[in-house]
Structures are given as C-alpha cells and as structure tokens.
Amino acid sequence: MTRLLVVEDNPVFREGAAQYFASRSDVQTAYAQDAKTAIVHLWTEPRSIDAAIIDCFFPANEGSDPENLRLAGELAVQIMESEDPQERRIITGLEIFGRYVDLEDQELRTYVRAFVASTSGAVENSPVIRALEQVSCMGREATTQIAKNTLGLVYDATRAPRDYYAALRSAIAESSANQPSGILVAREATNVGIPFVLATSTYHHDILTQPVQDHASRKGWTLIDCSPGQEDHKATPQYWARAMGELEQRMQVSLENR
C-alpha cells in the first residue's frame, strides 16, 4: 500500500484526483491544501507518507494574515531567483548600475536587464559602466538620462529576457493562490527522502510556470503540466493517472538507490 500525499488547493482538481485514486486500492491518499499542512505530513514521525504529488501554486498557509503570506511567497521566489545563474548575474549587474543611475526608472531598468543578459564579460568592466563612471560627476539624474539614451539605442525587445520573478511577485500580490509554494514543499520532501512529482494545471512555458520549470529541471525534479489553454485537464482522472505513473517511476528509482 502506497501512502500518498496530494497537495492541491483547487477543489475541482482535488475531485479529479479523488476520482482516479478511488480506482486504486493500492493507494491510500491524504490531502493538503497549503504548504504548512503538507510539510507537517512530510515530517510526521513515524512516517505516514511514502510519496507525494505536489501542486506548484498554492498558499503557504491558509488563513494566515496577508503580510505573512506575502513573506512566504517571497521566500519561494527568492529561492528560485538565487539558484538561477542568469538571474543572479542580472541582479549583480543591476547592483553595479545602481551605483550610478536611478533604477526606479522602470524603462531604464528594463534596458539594463537586457544589456547585462546580453554581455558575457564582467559587467563592471564594460564600456558602458566605464562611461557612466566618467559622467557620474554630472549628478545622478543626468547620468540616469545618459544611460537611458545609450542603452535604449541597443535595446531589442524581441531578445530581452523576460522578468519571470517580477511577474511572479505581481501575481502573488494579486492572490496567495499564485504563490509557488510547491518549491517549498518539494525541498522538504527532498530533505526527508520522500519521492515526489510536481503537478500543475498551467503550461510549463507560461510566464509564471517557466521559472518553476527551470528550477525543477536544475534540481532533477519531474514536473507534469497541461497544454496551453487546457488547464481543466487537471480536473480529469486521466491527468492524475499520468501524474501517478510518473511518480511510480520516481519511487522505483528511489527504491533502487537505497
């Protein structure tokens, strides 16, 4: 008997899961709707969970006050951000540019992100930074305008990196259901050695899901998604059968590696 934890906050999707697992006499299912409850299940001793299917976007703690929810969502975003090599490089570049210019100017910030992402050498040694050092004596406002004019000439919107983390933060501000709490639960499952898969109703190249997909890929985690515009597929038993099939493969690998 496999003792399975399903982490899913959407009642329609939970119903799809329940329909599928009702047909599996070899699976005993527990459900969690937020990260706090899920992590309690994972850490309970003696162990009560053998494996988990974890949603990607759900609240960290249902019923918590808005500020605590925001901080929990920010933690998940920061974890992904800090382990994303390109984003780390961009953040470093922004810090260097921020010595000379006002990055509260969102248009300039967009230009700087694109410039840093397109360069291969050390940002502090770039001709643009050296030029800004030279003109910084003119004052921050003037230096900001010079940087904006210069970088605006080479900015190509079609090649600029998408700011996935800003999009996530904006979505989290709109609803705690957009918190990428699956990252937090997946990390805890990894820590206690419980096999799992991530399962989302979104498409993996969606602007909110792409950073989760990239993080999962770096970690070697499996993520099951839906095709574009097919979010309701997660409400079907077929979706959960696919998720369970992927999980059973992970469980077999885990068993072989013991």
Image (cartoon, grey):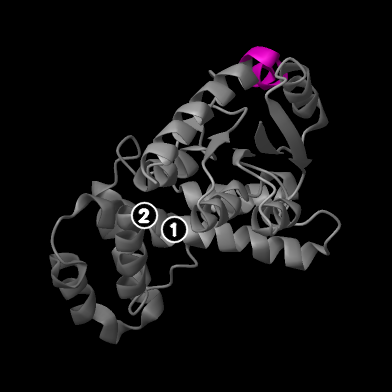
Amino acid carrying label 1: it is Glu
Q: Give the main secondary structure of the magenta stretch.
A: helix
What residue sits 54% from the left and 56% below the top? 192
Tell me which corner region of the image, top left, top right, bottom left or bottom right, holds residue 237: top right
Read off the residue under disc 1.
81
Asked if disc 1 and disc 2 are in contact, CB closer than 8 Å, the reply is: yes
Q: Is residue 61 left or right of residue 113?
A: right
CA distance for labels 1 and 2: 5 Å
Check residue 60 for magenta coloring.
Answer: no
- Can you give x and y, in whole percent of width and height, for residue 18 in the image? 78, 23
User: Which of these two is toward me, 122 or 7?
Assistant: 7
Mark yes or no: residue 90 visible: yes
What residue sits 37% from the left and 37% below the top? 256
- Can you give x and y, in whole percent of width and height, for residue 231 in the image? 65, 21
* Residue positioned most to the right: 63
Tell me which corner region of the image, top left, top right, bottom left or bottom right, holds residue 160: top left
Read off the residue under disc 2.
84
What segment carries the magenta color? 230-238
User: Which of these two is toward me, 245 or 49?
Assistant: 49
